[in-house]
Amino acid sequence: MLNELIEKRYSPRAFSGEPIEEEKIISLLEAARWSPSSMNEQPWRFIIGAKEEGETFNKIYDTLFELNQEWARNAPVLILAVAKEFNDRNKQNNRYAEYDLGQAIAHLTLQATSLNLYLHQMGGFNLDKARKLFNIPEGYLPMSVIAVGYLGNIDTLPDQLKVREKAKRNRKELSELVFDESFGHTSKLIGNENVSEIRSRDEKNYT
């Protein structure tokens, strides 16, 4: 059966603005810290800003593209996720850094969902501005901005975002994603009735 945290998780734009308890924020970061990584390099770095504290939140917010600013202003926490592009052990390029950062954020996401918190990850931000505002050195790549918070009222969103917020969550069919024998050849596993049952339960009215 699909884990209930995966079923529950989605990416809202409507946040309540209610502050997140400090111990919950720490637990999210701990979940990311215990994520697996190639050669245990742990190439994730997070710059975190709570809205109630002001300065760091505002700087992260200022890096966002305008459409994201429209709704992200209501989130109580913004996180700038950064990948460390080189290995400590030999100072060579770490080709798995972005992959491992993604794993860490996935762990953080499920921990958040278990605490009734929600995330919306954004690629729509100004990378160069992020580098400048936070003095991010060479060898570290800003990858995404993450809004974190409790669910809010959809009616607080602009009309165009309300439509997107209410849109049904959808995913490609497994037949397009899972192969055997050769790339593009759909795996025989996908015809299994159990797969169809799991997939149908996951088709919820989420964003």
Image (tube, rainbow, N blue to C red):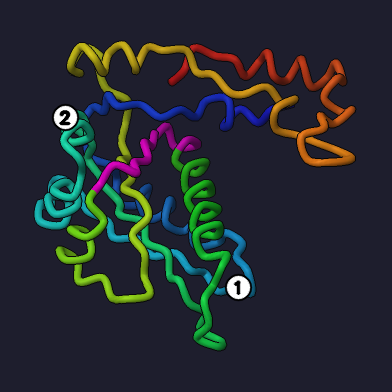
Residue 109: assigned label: none
- Residue at 34% of width from left, 41% of height from top? 122
Q: Of callouts 2 and 1, which one flags the residue occurring earlier in the amino acid sequence?
A: 1
| Circle 2 Cα neighbour tier, 10 Å, few/some/many (<14 / 14–19 / ≥20) | some
Magenta stretch: includes residue 139: no
Q: Mark 2 is on which residue type?
A: Glu
User: Which segment is the magenta one?
Assistant: 113-125
The number of numbered discs placed on residues in the rendered structure image is 2
Give residue 20's quadrant in the image: top left
Q: Position of residue 106 (x, y in %)?
A: 52, 46
Viewer-proximal residue, 163 or 54?
Answer: 163
List x then y, in percent, for residue 182: 84, 41
The quarter of the picture where the N terminus appears is top right
Q: Nearer the viewer, residue 51 or 86?
A: 86
Image x and y of residue 91, in percent = 50, 86
Residue of label 1? 40
| Occupied quadrant, residue 165 | top left
Question: In this image, 18 relative to 87: left or right?
Answer: left
Q: Residues within 10 Å of mark 1 (few under 14, many from 20)?
A: few
Determine the CA span between mark 2 and mark 1: 38 Å
- Which residue is at a point 23% across and 27% down the rendered structure image? 16
In the image, taking residue 180 as reference, residue 184 lies left or right, namely left
Q: Which residue is mark 2?
A: 70
Instruction: Name the residue type under label 1.
Output: Asn
